[in-house]
Image (cartoon, helix red, strand yellow):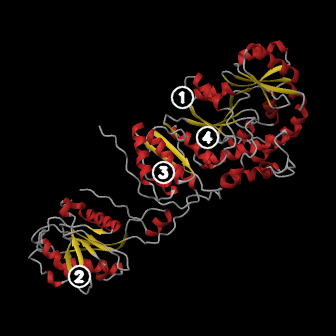
Amino acid sequence: GVGVLLVERLSDAERLGHRVLAVVRGSAVNQDGASNGLTAPNGPSQQRVIRQALANSGLSAAEVDAVEAHGTGTTLGDPIEAQALLATYGQDRDRPLWLGSVKSNIGHTQAAAGVAGVIKMVMALRHGVLPKTLHVDEPSPHVDWSAGAVELLAEPLQWDRHDRPRRAAVSSFGVSGTNAHIVLEEPPLAEVEAEPVGEPVGEPVGEAPVAWVVSGRSAEALRAQAGRLADAVAGVRPVDVAHSLVVSRSVFDHRAVVVGAGRDELVAGLRELAGGVASGVVQGVAGGGGKSVFVFPGQGSQWLGMGVELLECSSVFAARMAECEAALSWFVDWSLTGVLRGEDGQPGYDRVDVVQPVLWAVMVSLAEVWRSLGVVPAAVVGHSQGEIAAAVVAGALSLVDGARVVALRSQAIVALAGRGGMASVALGSAEAGVLLERWDGRLSVAAVNGPAATVVSGDVDAIEELLAHCEGLGTRAKRIDVDYASHSAHVESIGEELARLLAPVVPREAEVAWYSTVRREWLSGFEVDAAYWFENVRRTVWLEPSVGALVEQGFGVFVEVSAHPVLTMAVQETAERAGREVTVCGTLRRDDGGLARLWSSAAELWVGGVDVDWPQTYAGTRPQIIDLPTYAFQHQ
């Protein structure tokens, strides 16, 4: 036979939130020494090992309720063991000692016999019932049962506590003459609070959302597993379920994640998943994953209230935002968090010299949140001003230099206001280039985002003419809400000013690979001096070919790190055009910027095969491992 027991120091188990099934109160081992032979037990040695185990436990014999006997069922061994128990446990007690043996149920498991006895008594402690010993028609006539208060468990017995913890002992005697005796006690009734998992996430408004992760080897098993779980979680804390699913269950390829702020919402999601109509549940089949890329967009992902909820409920986000605010304070006269919260006297997002620094800080801070969840980029890529955040996250710029570039450059861009405009056109770069020839340099390609997504910039009147012309052609075109023309000849007028303002920038070697959408090549980090940041705002943004190059080089996961996804569709279309399957996800969404959205975004990665450090989603709590349904096998 085989048996496995996990033994841990009680204080460690309580601190780590592990479920304690029973406590080893004490134990002892001795040897018969010279004896009558291998098959002849030694009664005095058995008495000595029992008394030593009780002494080591700090207990009297009367404080133990039951003994799981070695009980081999032999006419020689059983009477000797019974007499040893009568002499030790059977004396000076008000209630009888109850005696049984699991060998009547499963036979002799040889070296695993003692483990089987321990498992039986742990189960008895948990259920509060002493099980009957099978096949006991009458007590052995070879034992003087009147010599002590010991009775056989001929029937199941309700196990009461009697104003103290329930306790049982287990004997195991080896054929070589080694005797072992262990005293078990039920776990403390008042559980010690487990140590918090990670740093506190903060104090979210209402009940904190948690993620329940479920997986199976097939779609049918996944649905069945969800149904089992939904039936088994009444009366338990959602965070305990989340923790137990993460640390005590295997992970298979068919995956789903239910995110909710309370048990009812979570169970409803499980029921939908079990029924095959889970519209609000993130699910999928894990693919090859691949290396991860953080994608940082340019202007356009902003919305009133972005980041505010995370400031309150994510300590990681709040800490990084505080660092960004300190870095920006050298270059701006407004408060970063004040702008985010919409405080009186603070400027709004209608100013380019406000919205760009705020977006930079939000992106840099969200990248830190992703890292805390175990999602670490193998590369970064940025779109227009998003390259400033990419440079900081890659380590090519210090936080202060990143703040310097985004703040001072956006202040210089104010001089371009009112002179130009930008528009998105549903054309590829080549088609757009041909179309723009008729404007003879008054318009230029500002950004190539996807196979049919190009941004054009230039003179105000030329933008108006372009929009009208596209309407006549039936080509989808839309004005972008800016009054300046980045990535066009207009930027030349601030070139000298930018060179002066950004001269103190000291680029460094990048710690994370960085693919430039300006130069369409990998950068070491040392290139991104003042001249590069002029180039970044003057030249075309080549997002599509950059993403294409990354896909070809084996990058299969693209995470848009922003307050609202603006590039995910373009990235997905580029990968599809290349015939590659990739995982693409955003981070937050407009008017949906809290932990629930963040966990759902993490879920999109996890179901695609990306490892996520799920315990960080309930950091600061004290979860316990609880019993959950076993795997829903699909029988054939």
| Residue at the disc numbered 2 | 88
| Residue at the disc numbered 1 | 581
- List x then y, in percent, for residue 105: 20, 61
Seen from the viewer's position, the closer of residues 570 and 326 is 570
| Residue at the disc numbered 3 | 246
Is the residue marked by circle 4 packed among few (<14), some (14-19), or many (20+) residues within 10 Å? Answer: many
Query: Cα distance, mark 4 to mark 2?
Result: 66 Å
- List x then y, in percent, for residue 546: 66, 27
Q: Is residue 196 left or right of residue 312?
A: left
In the rendered view, would you say 286 is above or below 39?
above
Is the residue marked by circle 1 packed among few (<14), some (14-19), or many (20+) residues within 10 Å? Answer: some
- Identify which residue is drawn at 27% across, 85% down: 94
Q: Amino acid at mark 3?
A: Val
Q: Amino acid at mark 2?
A: Thr
Q: Quadrant of residue 541?
A: top right
Seen from the viewer's position, the closer of residues 533 and 424 is 424
Camera-side mark, 1 or 4? 1
Residue 505 visible within the image: no
Q: Earlier in the sequence, mark 3 or mark 4?
A: 3
- List x then y, in percent, for residue 235: 47, 59
Query: Cα distance, mark 3 to mark 4?
Result: 23 Å
| Residue at the disc numbered 4 | 377
Residue at the bottom extreme? 92
Could you tell me which secondary element the residue under label 1 belongs to?
loop
Q: Earlier in the sequence, mark 4 or mark 2?
A: 2
Q: Amino acid at mark 4?
A: Pro
Q: Amino acid at mark 1?
A: Glu
Seen from the viewer's position, the closer of residues 624 and 561 is 624
Camera-side mark, 3 or 2? 3
Q: Is residue 494 left or right of residue 532?
A: right
Q: Earlier in the sequence, mark 2 or mark 1?
A: 2
Q: Say if mark 3 contacts mark 2, CB within 8 Å.
A: no
